[in-house]
Amino acid sequence: MAAREADTGGKVTITEIARQAGVSVPTVSRVVNGRSDVSPQTRARVEDLLRRHGYRRRAASPGTRAALLDLVFNDLDSPWAVQIIRGVEEVAHAAGVGTVVSAIHGRSGDAREWMRNLRARASDGVILVTSALEPTLHEELRILGVPLVVVDPAGSPALEAPTIGAANWSGGMAATEHLLALGHRRIGLIAGPPRLLCSRARLDGYRAALEGAGIALDESLVVPGDFRPESGFAACEALLGLPEPPTAVFAASDQMALGAIEALRRRGLRVPQDMSVVGFDDLPEVRWSAPPLTTVRQPLADMGKLAVRTVLRLARDEQPDSPRVELGTDLVVRASTAPPPPRPTGRPPTGR
């Protein structure tokens, strides 16, 4: 929160007070503005510095700004983002904290504009659901000292910040093991973008399940996508064009799974009678797809809730229980998976 710096004579900045106290700029601002969400030890340390530097706190006015969090995505064109927003809003609203939602679209200009806005509104914390920030912006965030949490990091975070993700490896393994248990031995994977940590983890889970069943990985059965329905459709078309198509497909997102189901429908193929399909996310709409989709439930709303609780703890100068958190995933079995169709007479078995 922006501090009221009148009566200081401009001798020292809030940033300098924060540096000397070993806390963030928003923490000093909360002390200056008489906010209660600061630990007693931190408050005493900051107030001592404020007195030494001649700050005189004025009473809060009726127009004093409420606490505010920035929630930043790369894009907002996915139901996946909506679920995270829902979790963030639930906890933030209960805590009396406002939320500003932004999308930077992977463009440096948009990211720099967001950073300018962040400085202007003096947010009390930032939740990043993107890693598409330039190194210079990483440094600006560090200098600002605004509490920061990264949700679903693309890789090793460039910022020293707590991260919150999901158990993608075990989720990919559970999806593949489910298909193996049904009797499938030729299982296609529609993978996510390889630059993302979650995509690589789901691929590794798929590979581990196959290895556990004694089935060698067939690279022709792994087709990349971008988590959108169109890429799921195109990837399924590619799998169907193989000399020996798979009998089941694990799509690394629900939206790609829905695209795959549409590709099968247009070919006159039925799910699951002709091919089984598993997704990943458990978005609300997939329970109403035709047929309802078997998928791996990723706790997206819970990830948003935990992100708010964590960033608010940081804003109170408290450390989170763990700097790296992975929430569990669960397989939800619905009607899109079944045993593979009988092999035509004379067709040799594949796999194990």
Image (spheres, rainbow, N blue to C red):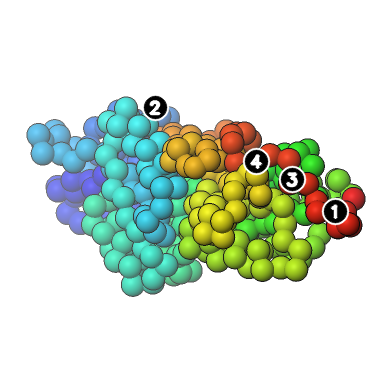
| Circle nearer the N terminus (4, 1) | 4
Inter-mark Cα distance, 4 to 3? 9 Å
In the rendered image, the residue lying farthest to the front is: 345
Identify the residue position indicated by label 1 in the image: 345
Say which quarter of the image contains residue 332. top right
In this view of the protein, which residue sits in the foreground, 153 or 63?
153
SS type, badge 1: loop
| Circle nearer the N terminus (2, 1) | 2
Q: Residue type at mark 2? A: Pro
Inter-mark Cα distance, 4 to 1? 23 Å
Query: Mark 2 or 1, which is nearer the eye?
Result: 1
Inter-mark Cα distance, 2 to 1? 78 Å
Q: Which disc is residue 340 wearing? A: 3
| Circle nearer the N terminus (2, 4) | 2
SS type, badge 2: helix
Q: Position of residue 220 (x, y in %)?
A: 74, 67
Q: How many marks can you see?
A: 4
Q: Which disc is residue 40 wearing? A: 2
| Circle nearer the N terminus (2, 3) | 2
User: At x 63% / y 68%, what residue is drawn?
Assistant: 238
